[in-house]
Image (cartoon, grey):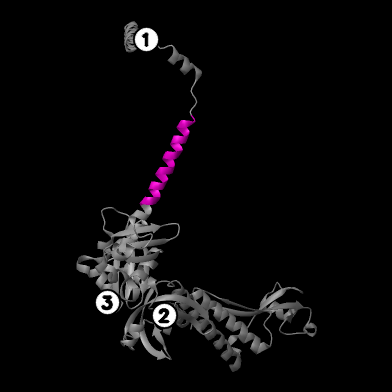
Amino acid sequence: MSKELMDALDLLEKEKNISKDSLFDAIENSLVTACKNNFGKAENIRVEVDRENCDFKCYAEKTVVETADDVMDPMLEISLDDAKKISKKSKVDDIVNVPLNSKEFGRIATQNAKNVILQKIREEERGAIYNEYYKKEHDIVTGVIQRYVGKNISINLGRADAILNENEQVESEAKSGFYKPTSRIRLYVLEVKNGSKGPRILVSRTHPDLVKRLFEQEVAEIQDGTVEIKSIAREAGSRTKIAVYSNNPNVDAVGACVGVNGARVNLIVDELNGEKIDVINWDENPGNLIQNALSPAKIVAVFADPDEKSAKVVVPDYQLSLAIGKEGQNARLAARLTGYKIDIKSETQAKDAPGFRMEDYLDDEEDYDEEYEEGEIEEVEEVEVDDAEIEEVEEVEVDDAEIEEAEDAEIEVEEDTDAEE
C-alpha cells in the first residue's frame, strides 16, 4: 500500500505541479481529522508520515495514572499497568504514545479524511496555477478561444481559463470574425487575481505592450539589449508607431526590427491581423524625434519647446493631409510617441501664423544683440582715465624741425594779413 501511495503522490506532483510535502501534510491533517471524528477529540493525537516510504504512525499522547479507577478520560489518560505494556520504563505522570489503528475508524471518519485530502489537493492546485500565471503577468500567452460569455470571450490557456473583456477586444477583429472558437490567439496578460474558485486571469488584445512583447520575442537584438524600445503608441487594429534606439553604432535599430525584406515586422503584422506598424529611430533631439514620428510625411521645419512640451511643425502644402493623417491619426500617434503637443501647418498657413516662421525667432535674437551693444556703449562712456596716463600725454616730445615749420607758417600768415591791410 505504501508503494501505491508513493506512486499516486508522484503522479499528482507531476501532473498538477503540487509539491509532495504539501500532500504529506494533507494526509497527516486528514488522519488527525479522522481521529477527532472517531474519538470525539484530537488535541493529543499525533500523526507521523515517513517521507521516504510513506509509512505512517498514528498515536495518542496519554498521561499515566496510578490505577484504572483513576482514569477519568480514556483518550487522555492510561493506567500504569497498561502503560507498562507499551513501555516498561513508564511511571506515573509520564506521557506515553499509545498507537491507534486507523483501520478501525468508522465510515464517516474515513470519508471525512478523504474529503480533507481532496480539499487540500484542490487548494494546492489553485495555488500552483496562480503562481504559474502570476509570473506571466504583463507578458504574452497563447490560448485557444472557447466560447462567448455574453460579449466577453473565454480563452483556454492550458491549465486555466482567461477572460477577454469586450473593452479589451480590437473592434475591427471582432467585426471581421477573427475571434472564432477553436482559433489560437496570442494575448497580453493584464492582471492575475487569486479568487475562491481559482485564479482569475484578465487578458487584452488592445494593450500597446502586446506589440512591444511581440517585437521582443521576434527581434534577437532587442532580446540581447543591443536595440531598445524607447516609446510606443498604438491605436489597436489600425496603426502603431514604435521608436527604437541602437546602443551599437554598427547596428541599425530600424533595420533590425524590420528584418530582411520586412520578414520580422510582417510576422508581427500578421499576428495583429494586418495592423500597420511604423518603426522609427529614437533621437534625443526633440525636433529630430518629432520629424521621425511624423513620417512618412516630409517636414520643412520644427520649432520645439522642451519646457512647454509643445512643437510647431511646418510641412509642404501637398504634405499637410499626410502629416495629419486620416482623422488626425498620424499626428495623434506622433504626439503620444514623443510626449509633445504638436501643431501642424502648411507653408502657406505658416506665413501668417505667429511662431511658425523663422523670422519670429530671429527677431528675438536681433533685439537681444541691440540691447547688448547699447550696454557696451554705456560701459565705454563711463571709463575713467588715470592721472599717470594724462602726464604721459603731456610729456610727449615734438621734433625741432616741426616747430620751425610751424613758426614759418605763422610768419607767412602775419605778412599776408599786413598786405591786405
The residue where tag 1 is placed is: 398
Residue behind mark 2: 15
Amino acid tagged 3: Asp
| Residue 414 shows in the view | yes
* Mark closest to the chain's N terminus, 1 or 2: 2
What's drawn in magenta, residue-wise? 362-382
**Sequence order check, earlier mark of 1 and 3:** 3
* Residue drawn at (19%, 67%) of the image: 261
Q: Main secondary structure of the magenta part?
A: helix
Task: From the viewer's side, name the closer residue of 157 and 210.
Answer: 210
Q: Is residue 407 above or below residue 253?
A: above
The residue wearing badge 3 is: 270
Question: Tag 2's secondary structure?
Answer: helix
Closest to the camera, between mark 2 and mark 3, is 3
Foreground mark, 1 or 2, reads 1
Q: Which amino acid does the dot numbered 2 rest on?
A: Glu
Is residue 83 shown above or below 419? below
- Give coordinates of residue 64: x percent, y percent: 74, 77
Tag 1 secondary structure: loop
Q: In terms of image quadrants, where is residue 310?
A: bottom left
Q: Residue extending furthest front?
A: 421
